[in-house]
Amino acid sequence: MVLSSAPDTHVSLLLIEGGLTVIALALPFALPRLANGLFARIERAFAKLARRRGLSVIAVGVAALLLRLAILPFCPIPLPFIPDDFSFLLAANTFALGRLTNPTPAMWVHFESIHISMQPTYMSMYFPSVGLVLAASKVLLGNPWFGIVISCALMCAAICWMLQAWLPANWALLGGILAILRLALFSYWVNTFSAGGAIAALGGALVLGALPRLTRTPKMRYGLLLAVGIALLVTSRPYEGFLLCVPVAIWLGHWLLRGQNRPAPMTLVRMSALPLAVLIAAGSWLGYYDYRTFGKATTLPYSVNRATYAVAPYYVWQQARPEPVYRHPVLRNFYNQNELDAYKKIHKLSGFLPQTLAKLTRTFEFYAGFALLPPLFMMRRVFRDRRIRFLLWCVLLPQAW
């Protein structure tokens, strides 16, 4: 397998972000009158937009889409360069041809690749939602990458809509704008063909945005959006989605048992019919996909490929597997050296702390970076804010596992 080289922009983007952050912090001190007037005008303009909630959501989504397209001369359409990209593009090409999977090539041992299953069929090892989005974009727009951009734009809009249910409108709009700046312009979610994060984030935002609306004003559309969000999680990141849905299910159960404005039983049945149909349809389709691709409806993606090639498990509490027979050095290097070395390090006291700190650093760089470092000093007030305490639990539970 030949991988295209990608420009190393990580350090340069961090330097640019750090420099702009320093300028933004220094401006109020160097030119207080100018900065005060400028920031006040910007705040009034955004406050006016934030009061129009529907328009705010649309504006965030459109801005994310147009801004990413506007910087194409400086940050062009990416080329696939990591194994995940080629795996997802295989799924996209397969779906675009109207197939769920491909037959195993006659000389498949010569075509083995990372994150691609060869038996029982030839297909990406991942869950199908990203491949479906890429396929739709390839068929309708001519390039699968545009599906990535649209997914990120919808994610940013959904984040703004979700925050409107928990926070004042001004803060919700700010959250949508921060999502654009952090995720929809320069992150790997939009600059590779591996958009699983954006699709899962879209599903999570729909779930967390529909939940309080449904319990405050029980309407079928909120239940339907909740079901669509769960379906996106199931077909993209089911493990993380399950951990997110646990506190959501507890909230809904408490509301159904003791909620003051819960609907009558027959009304609840009518309201639940269409959302349940969406969930059943999504689960049934995924089961059929697994059956056609991996041989059984209960055999989930990942499992066949990992059982065939992987030595190190995904989770730290699992035991390493015996080394399989590798027919290509690149496969052995990836699975038996790169992955297994990291697994061994985290199981040693001397390696556990450095590995954990490295994960925290990568998480900080991705979600906060230099630009959002100053607001982190207000985290104490965030944990004391009852309005978003439930959201904190939803964030911390998957991280803890």
Image: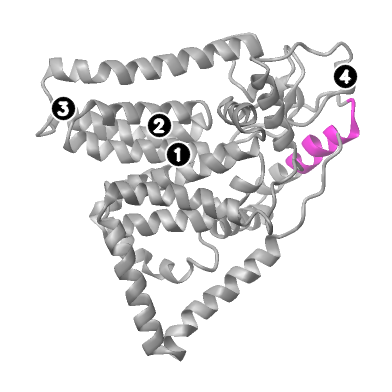
Residue beneath label 4, please?
109
Say which mark, if any, is on residue 257: 3
Say which quarter of the image contains residue 256.
top left
User: Which amino acid type corresponds to the residue marked 2 in the rendered image?
Assistant: Gly
Residue depicted at 70% across the width and 36% down the height: 84
Mark-to-mark CA distance, 2 and 3: 23 Å
Q: Position of residue 17 (x, y in %)?
A: 58, 69
Do the CB atoms of the residues marked 1 and 2 lie less than 8 Å apart?
yes
Do the CB atoms of the residues marked 2 and 4 lie less than 8 Å apart?
no
Residue depicted at 38% across the width and 46% down the height: 58
From the viewer's perspective, is residue 344 above or below residue 101? Answer: below
- Mark 2 element type: helix
Q: Give the range drawn in magenta.
A: 327-340
| Left or right for 278, reference 217 | right
- Of mark 3 and mark 4, the one earlier in the sequence is 4
From the viewer's perspective, is residue 206 above or below residue 295? Answer: below
Q: Nearer the viewer, mark 3 or mark 4?
A: 4
- Of mark 4 and mark 1, the one earlier in the sequence is 4
Residue depicted at 24% across the width and 53% down the height: 387
Q: Residues within 10 Å of mark 1 (few under 14, many from 20)?
A: many
Residue 130 covered by magenta stretch: no
Q: Which of marks 2 and 3 is in front?
A: 2
